[in-house]
Amino acid sequence: MPWQAGYCRVSLNSFSLGLNKTRKVGMAGAEKAKILVIDDDEGVVHTLSRIIESLGFEVDHALTLAAGMGKINALDVDLVLLDVNLPDGSGLDVIGEVSAMPDAPQVIILTAYSDPDGAELAIESGAWDYIQKPASPKAIKLQILRAMEYREQKRRSAPPLFLKSHAIIGSSKVLQDCLKKVARIAGTDAHVLLTGETGTGKEIFAKAIHENSARSKGSFIVVDCSILSENFIESVLFGHEKGAFTGADRKRSGLALLANGGTLFLDEVGELPESIQGSFLRVLQEKKFRPVGSEEEIHSDFRVISATNKNIEQMVLDRQFRSDLLYRLKSFSLELPPLRHRKGDIGEIASHYAEIFCRQQKTDLKELSDDFMETLEKYDWPGNVRELVNTMETCIASTPSEKILFAYHLPSKIRARVTRASFTKSPPEKEALPPLSDLHQPLPSFRQAMAERERQYLSALYARTGGEIEAMCRMSGISRAVLYRKLKTLSLS
């Protein structure tokens, strides 16, 4: 591997990166950092194990993808050396899943196949590196040491996970993983892009980032880009002088100045008019702007957190949004989970807001019956947390004298949708393979059987969504990059 500018030469023998190879585990002693090898070639496993042990790390191995994923979930793994072609699947398909885990281990792909598309996909999915076999022990050691040093540095500098926010309700794993990212983002001063469906609480998460940042004593200024006309948005953001335009009867400060020292939250940033995107990009770069009708520039230092429920990357491709502005806005990006992916939080959210609305209505706290809670959990909540909060407010306001809320007190559209879903039967799936009761019938290989099953699933997914990529990703849980590759491999256009 050629040495690049900015890299320091590493002594593999003396371990000069300064990495601490042990982790404290209380008074019982110290535990070695652990590396997992997932490869179906036992010879490769043996060779890699010797290399890892020579560096002073603990090593474990798995010969299949399923066994490897089981060990990642069960053990405290720091690094995974992952093969691509395994008996029960491709290592590329699980990189995203591993990277999304709390305290996710680093992943280094080791494969005998030269695949530029696979290498690009691996890095985009979160892999540390993509190494082609055969590789020299020195090259493998170097990447292991770099990955482990990065992990150790990340662990030492990790911000506390305690968040000052009483508005984010829930204890599900999905939400807790999201809050860990919020804590990390809050420890920086970089701009942030929040994405997710309508009603997932983007403004609440933006406030949580602000309240836990170094700018928490500054103002949190909200700009709803969807309700500002193109003629007045520049005046709203940057202010104007008296007489700058018809109706400007006095001088006004813009929201960008009010956010000085604090945070400017751009809600529905995808609606920001193209005519002002260039001006706003310059403000982010220079931290200066000129009010409408003024000849003098004003300095303002603010952090931008923006939010959208649109596919803003597609808007860039369609030339509806400037790519250079998007890069500035998304130094960090965070996708908020929809409520249907955090079902375990529904009861907690409902109880929390039931108490709030009972206090507002000055009524006794109401009990939420089992069938009420079951119906809430069976509903898919297309409006997410916002819809649930509004539903609880309606239920409390419409039952002033009732002490117990039953499912019957819920809006009829919710009960009707849940009832309809209980009677909806999915069509029987086609069998991936014909019945194999005939002992003389030849069996296909395991890979052929899995490939056929995957083709049938993707064909059904394609038909059910009309081939709409976003819908396919949302329904299947497969990332866009992986989905494109699979559709191409299976010749599904």
Image (cartoon, rainbow, N blue to C red):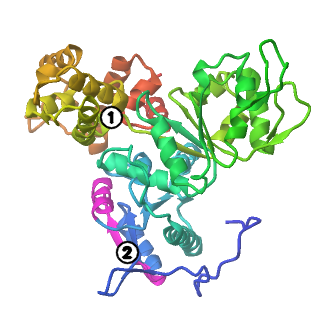
Disc 2 from disc 1: Cα separation: 39 Å
- For residue 59, the mark is 2
Say if 66 sits above or below 203 in the image.
Answer: below
| For marks 2 and 1 on the same chain, the one whose residue lies earlier in the sequence | 2
What span is in magenta?
Answer: 53-74
Q: Which residue is mark 1?
A: 339
Q: Is residue 488 left or right of residue 349?
A: right
Q: What amino acid type should be assigned to the residue bearing mark 2?
A: Val
Identified by mark 1, the residue type is Leu
Instruction: Pinpoint residue 211: horizontal percent, then vertical percent.
Output: 51, 50
Residue 445 placed where, x, y %?
Answer: 27, 43
Mark nearer the viewer, 2 or 1: 1
Nearer to the camera, 287 or 34: 287
- In the rendered structure, the answer to whether residue 392 lies left or right of residue 458 reads left
Judge whether residue 72 is colored magenta.
yes
Residue 202 percent coordinates (x, y): 47, 36
Quarter where residue 68 is shown = bottom left
Q: Residue at x 45, y 83 (%)?
A: 56
